[in-house]
Image: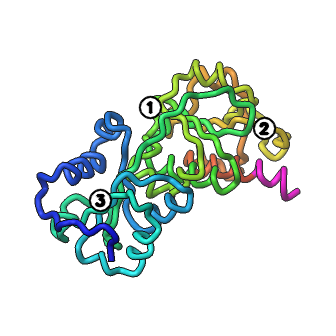
Amino acid sequence: MISNPTELITSDKNATVKLAKALLTQARQRKKQAQTVIEGIHLLDAALRSDYSLVQVLVAESAQSHSEVQQILSRLPTYTSVLILSDSLYSSIRTLGTGVDIMAIIKIPALDLPVIESDCLILNDVQDSGNVGTLLRTAAAVGIETVLCTINSAQAWSPKTLRAGMGAQFALTIYENLAIDDILAKVKSPLLATSSHTDTLIYDYDLSKPVAWIMGHEGQGVSDELMQCATPIALPQPNGQESLNVAIAGSLCLYETLRQRSYR
């Protein structure tokens, strides 16, 4: 069982419970506290495998004896606080559907943007958490470790984006809330952006050296300010669809980059 037993918490007035609920549901609180919540065995396992510190762990009473919960708890540093919540209280704050009832509060990294001369992915006001999570997961899969997010992009560390990314955040260095001017000043790798207004196909473009792929807003695309500094690259669509979902387009670009370098 739990190495540091704690009393059963049944009240939603508990400070940690109130904090967890606020972090799960309010972007403003996540920004103010510089913390977020990960839910479920997979995300806690991903965090621990990356040696990412858990501030506090919350477990439903009935989940204490679950084998996967026991395995997670056995890997926690001795200083990590573990709280046991009544099942009804845990159910009242969770946002994950059916699953193993365990969550953790973690810190959101606060990072200053350095000069970047390596591969990176720039998310320019990508607003859907599912799209952001998918792009983060793809970047981690192909080995691109640096992601830059402009001010109006969905939060990379929100619970929904964390679920969509399947914990990819723990394998990446993510800079958020960036102004476009800062990106243009610090990113030295050539900027590339998908566009339907060019004849330069991605398959004809040399991606053997570091590049900075820009993925834009779902409806408006890449901002004019960034597009003016980028090389437009076309993804062929012979059947004439107007555009691709940004997560699909981004994944195609990242995998073509990988293919050219490693699987010619």
Q: CA distance from mark 3 to mark 1?
A: 23 Å
Are the residues at dot 2 and dot 1 in contact (C-beta closer than 8 Å)?
no
The stretch of residues the image draws in magenta is 256-264
Pointer 3 and pointer 1: residues touching (CB < 8 Å)? no
Answer above or below: position of 182 versus 142.
above
State yes or no: residue 244 in magenta.
no
Q: On screen, 75 above or below 53?
A: below
Q: In this picture, is 137 found above or below 1?
A: above
Amino acid at circle 2: Pro
The quarter of the picture where residue 124 lies is: top right
- Residue at (50%, 53%) from the top-left corner? 52
Compared across the picture, whether 156 is left or right of 26 comes to: right
* Image location of residue 178, percent across then percent down: 51, 27
- Which residue position holds label 1? 152
Crowding around mark 1 (Cα neighbors within 10 Å: few <14, some 14 to 19, many 20+) is some
Horizontal relation, residue 217 to residue 15: left or right: right
Q: Position of residue 76 (x, y in %)?
A: 43, 64
**Mark positioned earlier in the residue sequence (3 or 1):** 3
Determine the secondary structure under disc 3: loop
Residue 260 is a magenta residue = yes
Is 215 on the left or on the right of 116, as rendered?
left
Secondary structure under the numbered disc 2 in the rendered image: loop
**What is the three-letter code of the residue carrying label 3?**
Thr
- Its colouring scheme is rainbow
Mark 2 crowdedness (10 Å alpha carbons): few <14, some 14-19, many ≥20: some
Q: Are marks 2 and 3 in contact (CB under 8 Å)?
A: no
Q: Which residue is at the front of the view, 241 or 31?
A: 31
C-alpha separation, residue under disc 2 versus residue under disc 1: 26 Å
Query: What residue sits right under mark 3 in the picture?
Result: 95
Q: Main secondary structure of the magenta part?
A: helix
Q: CA distance from mark 2 to mark 3?
A: 39 Å
